[in-house]
Image: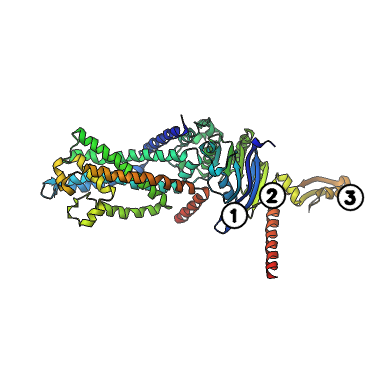
Amino acid sequence: MTPLVSAARSGMRRGLFEFRQSFITSTDIIGIVVPNLILLTVMIFMRGSTVGTTGFSLGTMSLSGVLGMSVAFSGMMTVTQHLAVEREDGTLLRAKAIPNGMFGYLTGKVVLIACLTVVNLLVILIPGLLLFDGLALDSVGSWVTLIGVLVLGLLATMPIGAILGSLFENPRNAGVLMLPVMGLVAISGIFAPLGEMTEWLRFVGQLFPIYWLGLGMRSALLPDSMAVVEIGGSWRHLETIGVLGLWAVIGFILAPAVLRRMARRESGASMAQRREKALQRVT
Amino acid sequence: MIGDDLVLDVRDLRMRYGTNDVLKGVTFQARRGEVLSLLGPNGAGKTTTIEILEGFRMRSAGEVSVLGVDPANADESWRARLGVVLQSWRDHGKWRVRDLLAHLATFYEPYHRPWDADELIEVVGLTEHARKRVHRLSGGQRRRLDVAIGIVGRPDLLFLDEPTVGFDPAARREFHELVHRLADEDTTILLTTHDLAEAEKLADRILILAGGKVIADGSADQLSLQMATETEVKWTLHGQRYVHATTEATKFVHDLFKQHGDDIADLEVRRGTLEDTYMAMVVAFESGQYEAAEREFVEVAR
């Protein structure tokens, strides 16, 4: 077995290990349950409203879009957060000190985030299927679309997360990302169709993966008749694949270089400096 | 000396940050199985030197060979022969001690046989904590885990940066035994410490770094001879205890016996400790630098 294959296996085991650890760590469980519970509650209140003149439940429509948003959040924000935190606490330096450790670390991260994303999806999807009318996962096609959007979404968003995570020296600063991301959510048609937005906001929204992830998930879970409220009156599968694919390609070109640069700059001295700073904040 | 035996070969190593020269031509070698201790005041460039040798930092100039390879373009099979003991803080907090060591060991398997996790845990004295999560360990236990992680891949060369900070005396002794054991198995060890007694106990050779240069290189004995530090002589005469400090102890004791003969009792002659030598060297170096700066100033003034 070549060292790289072996490191990939170690990394996968690492990811599954950390995934299991998430379920015996109370803060991690709370981090998964609480936000999803809030989202579900909000959408249950939205069940009564209808989308335009279709008579279709706004809650059901939003729930599908939220699944797309959830993938984007896991892919981008969680990766950013993990990288920033684990750079500060020395996990990355340790990885750098062992053979192929960085490769193993990143493999593990991808596995962990993918698993957590699936959990986040299921936490909303399962109650959604039970509580909301109009959601349908009854054909092979809808399953294929769901899984396809999930995989493509992760490929498109994880490199962005890795790049952002490499740029933040201090994990507490990574929190400021939430503001622009929430802004993006607002113009991505997750909670309401984009129809009422001004032209240029609609254009900006469509540049980013969140919109397309929402659209993709809606196309997987909603009846085809609901496509009429979307831009162009269609699910635009080709465009979805195109935009998410483009983000993935750009991400996979840029991320390795950015990650290498970050790894190169890791050293005991820079770690010690960050530790010093963090300890000063505590006292 | 056989070339293959040279594990570390550093020649005229220089490091500059902006306009600040941190290393101004560091030169030293280490042979297989040697334990080298790097001493020096804070800011002398110890950490920079070690990080260059570990391949974590690029040098500005000079030649460096670590296990026969230039760390600036070394690969992962080189990395697999290296052990780095890092000062940990709170990484891998959720992992259990045994799981973490077993996991990290797998990265070395394609290269050579790493330590068995349970065996290693016993060697560093963490057996009763093997199932504990890392964030539940005390500072000293964590440090032992750091050492275990550093040696899990059975390195040929081990870097230890301040290894025993936070150890109680018993843990310190066990750690010293571990270092001796590793050295007996032909592991070359480069350690930094501020504990001079520890350096004296562990190291075959001591390097003192000051002002970005190696100002001394030798065994503790050689260094103390070189510096001719004062030796303390104690004796009892007619029931009274006397103490005298001298740089020429042999002559002094000889004179003492010539004068008082058999009346001398409880004689003790104690050569200056490494700490005395170290302080004398650093002070001499710093005052030398001061004089050099002064000379320069006078020359410029002319």
Q: Residue B259: which disc?
A: 3
> Which of pointers 1 and 3 lies earlier in the amino acid sequence?
1
Dot 2 crowding, Cα within 10 Å, few <14, some 14–19, many 20+: some
Q: Do the residues at discs 1 and 3 belong to one chain?
A: yes
- Three-letter code, disc 2: Ala
- Mark 1 — on which chain does it sit? B
Q: Position of residue B82 (x, y in %)?
A: 55, 38
- Three-letter code, disc 3: Gln
Give the Cα separation between the discs numbered 3 and 2. Answer: 38 Å
Q: Position of residue A227 (x, y in %)?
A: 16, 44
- Mark 2 — on which chain does it sit? B
**Which one is in front in this view, the residue at disc 1 or the one at disc 2?**
1
The residue pinned by badge 2 equals B216
Give the Cα separation between the discs numbered 1 and 3. Answer: 54 Å
Residue A130 vs residue A261, the one in the foreground: A261
Q: Position of residue B282 (x, y in %)?
A: 68, 54
For the point 18% across and 46% down, the residue is A59
Give the Cα separation between the discs numbered 1 and 2. Answer: 17 Å
Q: Position of residue B135 (x, y in %)?
A: 45, 42
Horizontal side of B48 relative to A92 (left or right) equals right
For the point 88% across and 49% down, the residue is B260
The residue pinned by badge 1 equals B22
